Amino acid sequence: MTLRRLIELASRNRTLTRHMSARYGNRPLVVSPDAALRWLKPGMAAFEPGLLAIIEHFITPGMVAWDIGANVGVFAYPTAHLSRTKVVGVEPDPFLARLLRRTNALPANADLDVEIVGAAIGDRDGIARLRIAGRGRSTSGIEGAIVSSQHGKTREVMTVPMLALDTLLVDFPPPGFLKVDIEGAELLLLAGARRVLAEAKPIILIEVNRTTWPEASATLLAAGYELFNGDCPPEHRVPASAWTCNLLAIPAAR
């Protein structure tokens, strides 16, 4: 057994509190290396610098954001700090959703408006079977999604609620920014997002894989978006002419 695997097994269900930088108010997040081993790294390296660059470039005061696949909140909480308005965090894994609620309950975050929805997002309202990854829980995904090579063996299967993305419009303000990281289920999300794409028209950062990229790109182009490489610095706006892990979609009118 490799050292990495031993660390993964020893990290299961363990939690710790990490603080963001002064730029984000030194906000505390309750995290777990069971989600991803990067939470054992020191400093801000664990907080995904590329994602923070997207937040810095696009999130403005008053902008509502939806974080689909919220994990431990590395998008939701810095966004809420900068936007000073509602962020909706959607996370199907009960373990990770509990961490998000613990972060919400910390006194230092009492002024933030982050609402947690414990559900998967798909093409319809119903139920989904969530496969909990044998490695980091950040690579867990619902049945019907394309499994990441980082998933490892499934440790258990849970039945969880599933909502179409459009259903969130019933109870939450429409997003100005939509972040999607749902481990291969992005085509299901887009199939249930017709009103969001047509009416809200948020800026979108969506993780895609080589299999889902062609259809996801075609759907977003048909909805009136221009596509850029979300792995490049956002100020450069490099067109997404080929597969990129993170696709940045901006309404053509902007």
Image (tube, rainbow, N blue to C red):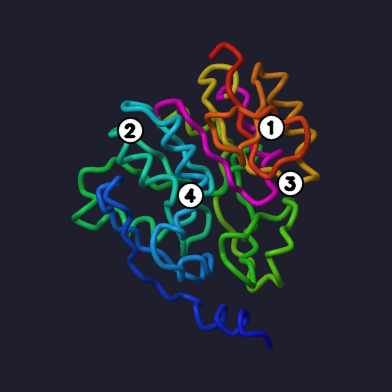
Observer-nearest of 63 and 240: 240
The residue under label 3 is 209
Q: Residues within 10 Å of mark 4 (few under 14, many from 20)?
A: few
First reached walking from the N terminus: tag 3 or tag 4: 4
Observer-nearest of 115 and 36: 36
| Position of 118 relative to 199 (above/below) | below
Residue 12 x %, y %:
50, 77
Q: Is residue 43 left or right of residue 163?
A: left
Dot 2 amino acid type: Ser
Q: Residue at x 66, y 16 (%)?
A: 224
The residue under label 1 is 191
Report the label total: 4
Residue 124 x %, y %:
63, 38
Q: Quadrant of residue 191?
A: top right
Residue 179 located within the stretch drawn in magenta: yes
Element marked by disc 2: helix
The Cα atoms of the two marked residues, 2 and 1, are separated by: 28 Å
The Cα atoms of the two marked residues, 3 and 4, are separated by: 20 Å
Observer-nearest of 86 and 108: 108
Element marked by disc 3: loop
Q: Which mark is residue 49?
A: 4
